[in-house]
Image (tube, rainbow, N blue to C red):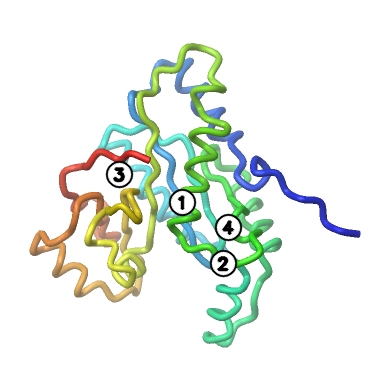
C-alpha cells in the first residue's frame, strides 16, 4: 500500500503556535513582535541538549529583545544527509519517520515546541535556507497567526530566528551576519565540550555581523549581540 501524501499542516503543525497566540491575545500579553524559533540538524536522536538550546534562545528573545515567542520548530534533516553523517561516525541511521516520532514524543508536554517533518520528508536534501523559508512562509502566510486569532490581531510583525549550536554556527560562518541568501537572525548557543576558542575571539573583538547573537552556555546571562536589524521576508 502506498503511503498517502502528507499535507503541509501535518508536516509543519501550527496548533501550538495558534493556541499560544490566542492565549496571549486573551491575556493582553501579545506584544507587537512575535517570534518563531527553528533548529535544524540530524537530531539522531533528539536529546535534552537540543531542547535546552531552544529554551535559552526563547529566554533571550523574551528578556532581551521583548519578543513574544509563540512556537519553536525542530526540523530533522533528510535521511541522505544523516545517513552519511552516521556512517562517518560509525553509527546507524535512524530513519526520518522514527526521528520525527521520537521528537513528537519528547515534545508532547511542551506547550510551544513542535517538530516539522517537511525537510526530512522531501525526495532529496534541502539546505537550511530553503527549509527556513518554507517553514516561515507556512506559519506566517498559509496558516498565519493573524488569520486564526478571533479578535483583531495586534501583532505587527512575526520574525523567524534560526537557532544553532555555536560550534556549528562557527563552521557555517554565520557570525558574519544576515544577508540576502539567509535573512533570518541567528541565535548561537555554546554547547558543552564544543571548541569555541576562535568564535569567542571574534565575539570579543566585536567582529560579528548584524543579526548574530551568541549565548555562552557557561554563563547564560552573558549575551553578545549587535544592534538588531529589521528582518523582512
Q: Residue furthest front?
A: 180
Q: Dividing the image into 4 quarters, which one contains the C terminus?
A: top left
Q: Secondary structure at mark 3?
A: helix
The first of marks 1 and 2 along the sequence is 2
Of the 4 image quadrants, the one containing the N terminus is bottom right
Mark 3 / mark 2, whichever is N-terminal = 3
Q: Earlier in the sequence, mark 4 or mark 1?
A: 4
> 92 left or right of 63?
right
Alpha carbon of mark 4 to alpha carbon of mark 1: how far? 9 Å
In front: mark 1 or mark 3? 1
Q: Secondary structure at mark 2?
A: loop
Labels 1 & 2 near each other (Cβ < 8 A):
no
Q: Residue furthest right?
A: 1
Residue in the picture at 55% in, 29% down: 18
N-terminal-most mark, 1 or 3? 3
Read off the residue under disc 1.
Answer: 132
Residue projecting furthest to the top: 151
Q: Which residue is mark 2?
A: 125
In 3D space, how far apart are the residues under numbered discs 3 and 2 (Cα atoms)? 31 Å
What residue would you read off at disc 3? Answer: 60
x and y percentages locating residue 147 in the rendered image: 54, 22
Mark 4 residue element: helix
Q: CA distance from mark 1 to mark 2?
A: 14 Å
The foreground one among 200 and 151 is: 151
Disc with the residue nearer the chain's start (2 vs 4): 4
Image coordinates for residue 165, horizontal then vertical, percent: 37, 63
Mark 1 vs mark 3, CA separation in Å: 20 Å
Task: Check the image and report above or below for 191 versus 219.
Answer: below
Callout 2 environment at 10 Å: few (<14), some (14 to 19), or many (20+)? some
Is 68 situated left or right of 25 in this image?
Answer: left
Residue at the disc numbered 4: 119
Front: mark 4 or 3: 4
Amino acid at each position: 500500500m502506498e503511503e498517502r501524501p502528507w499535507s503541509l499542516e501535518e508536516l509543519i503543525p501550527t496548533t501550538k503556535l495558534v493556541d499560544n497566540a490566542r492565549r496571549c491575545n486573551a491575556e493582553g500579553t501579545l506584544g507587537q513582535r512575535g517570534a518563531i524559533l527553528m533548529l535544524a540538524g540530524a537530531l539522531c536522536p533528539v536529546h535534552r541538549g537540543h531542547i535546552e538550546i531552544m529554551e535559552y534562545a526563547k529566554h533571550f528573545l523574551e528578556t532581551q529583545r521583548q519578543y513574544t515567542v509563540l512556537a519553536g520548530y525542530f526540523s530533522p534533516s533528510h535521511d541522505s544527509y544523516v545517513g552519511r553523517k552516521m556512517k562517518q561516525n560509525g553509527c546507524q541511521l535512524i530513519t526520518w519517520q522514527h526521528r520525527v516520532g521520537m521528537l513528537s514524543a519528547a515534545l508532547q508536554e511542551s506547550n510551544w515546541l513542535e517538530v516539522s517533518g517537511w525537510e526530512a520528508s522531501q525526495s532529496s536534501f534541502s539546505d537550511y535556507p530553503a527549509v527556513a523559508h518554507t517553514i516561515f512562509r507556512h506559519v506566517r502566510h498559509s496558516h498565519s497567526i493573524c488569520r486564526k486569532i478571533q479578535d483583531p490581531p495586534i501583532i505587527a510583525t512575526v520574525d523567524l530566528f534560526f537557532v544553532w549550536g555555536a560550534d556549528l554556527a562557527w563552521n557555517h560562518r554565520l557570525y558574519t551576519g544576515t544577508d540576502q541568501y539567509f535573512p533570518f537572525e541567528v541565535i548561537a548557543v555554546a554547547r558543552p565540550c564544543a571548541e569555541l576558542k576562535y568564535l569567542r575571539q571574534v565575539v570579543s573583538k566585536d567582529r560579528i555581523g548584524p543579526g548574530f547573537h551568541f549565548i555562552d552556555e557557561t554563563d547564560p546571562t552573558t549575551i553578545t549581540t549587535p544592534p538588531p536589524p529589521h528582518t523582512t521576508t
